[in-house]
Image (cartoon, rainbow, N blue to C red):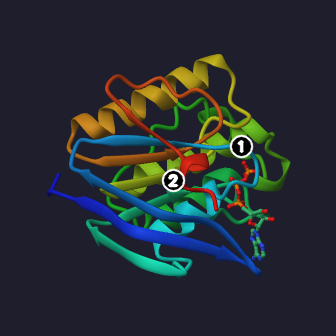
Amino acid sequence: MEACRLTATDIACRRGDRILFAGLSLALESGQALQVAGANGMGKSSLIRILAGLLRPFSGEVERQGSIGLLDEKPALDEHQPLGEALAFWSALDTGSAPLDRLGLAPLLDVPVRYLSTGQRKRAAIARLMGQEAQVWLLDEPLNGLDTDAVALTEKLVEDHCAAGGIALIASHQRFELKGMARLELAEFAT
Ligand SMILES: Nc1ncnc2c1ncn2[C@@H]1O[C@H](COP(=O)(O)OP(=O)(O)OP(=O)(O)O)[C@@H](O)[C@H]1O
């Protein structure tokens, strides 16, 4: 994997008329992972969106080197299509292949996306992320709805991604097991 980098310098986030956090800086290089922790409403999803380039920071700068893969609560999969076809739309464009068997999705390919359970939906979103082969993973609550086996698998996939030279930033209030992962407490930047 080509070298990648994600930096945020002195960023602040405004939502409505509130500044949620300010003075936040981070720098991630190839192979590194960071967990962003914080209570509900602290601004974890907003930070992920700023880092992804989907939301402008109120102040400060973000620099990205490498392709971005975003996993959030809205998988970009057509709700009206069977899972297999919804994933096939992306696999025609993506470079990688999704590990459908490992993610327990193989028996679900005929099921319309809208009928998938919360955990199945999350697994499908992870499958798409894997197929995308992006260098920088921005994961918003990646463990939500997953059972114990799927949690362990997701942690392993992130570990492998970083071992291959990728970056992972994980916004979650849940514990995410990854050796050597740094942790950022959003509360320390709350205004
Ligand atoms: N478009 C918006 N306009 C105004 N306020 C917003 C907007 N989007 C989010 N907010 C507010 O910004 C705050 C932070 O939201 P955000 O989703 O980033 O928090 P979070 O830490 O991810 O929360 P959770 O753990 O509950 O998912 C919340 O108070 C939310 O209501």
What is the quadrant of the C terminus in the image?
Answer: bottom right
Vertical position of residue 72 compared to residue 58: above or below: above
Q: Residue at x 61, y 47 (%)?
A: 187
Alpha carbon distance from label 2 to label 1? 28 Å
The residue at the far left in this view is: 2
**Is ligand 1 less than 8 Å from the beta carbon at label 1?**
yes
Residue identifier under label 2: 128
Residue 66's image quarter? bottom left
Q: Is residue 30 above or below residue 162?
A: below
Classify mark 1: helix, strand or loop: loop
User: What type is the residue that disc 1 sits on?
Assistant: Ala
Q: Is residue 19 left or right of residue 178?
A: right
* Residue drawn at 61 percent across, 54 percent down: 44
Q: Earlier in the sequence, mark 2 or mark 1?
A: 1
Disc 2 on helix, strand or loop? helix
Q: How many marks?
A: 2
Mark 2 vs ligand 1: CB below 8 Å: no
Crowd around label 1: few <14 · some 14–19 · many ≥20 (10 Å): few
Residue 142 shows which numbered tag?
none
Considering depth in this image, is 179 or 102 the residue closer to the camera?
A: 179
In percent of width and height, residue 182 lies at: 37, 35
Give amino acid for label 2: Arg
Q: Quadrant of residue 71?
A: bottom right
Q: Which mark is residue 39?
A: 1
Give the percent coordinates (x, y) of residue 62.
37, 73
Which residue is depicted at the point 20% across and 44% down? 165
x, y percent for residue 32? 28, 42
Q: Residues within 10 Å of mark 2 (few under 14, many from 20)?
A: many
The correct choice, above or below, for 110 with respect to 64 in the image is above
Identify the residue at horizontal 40%, vertical 58% (top origin).
Answer: 132
What residue occupies the far right of the structure in this picture?
Answer: 115
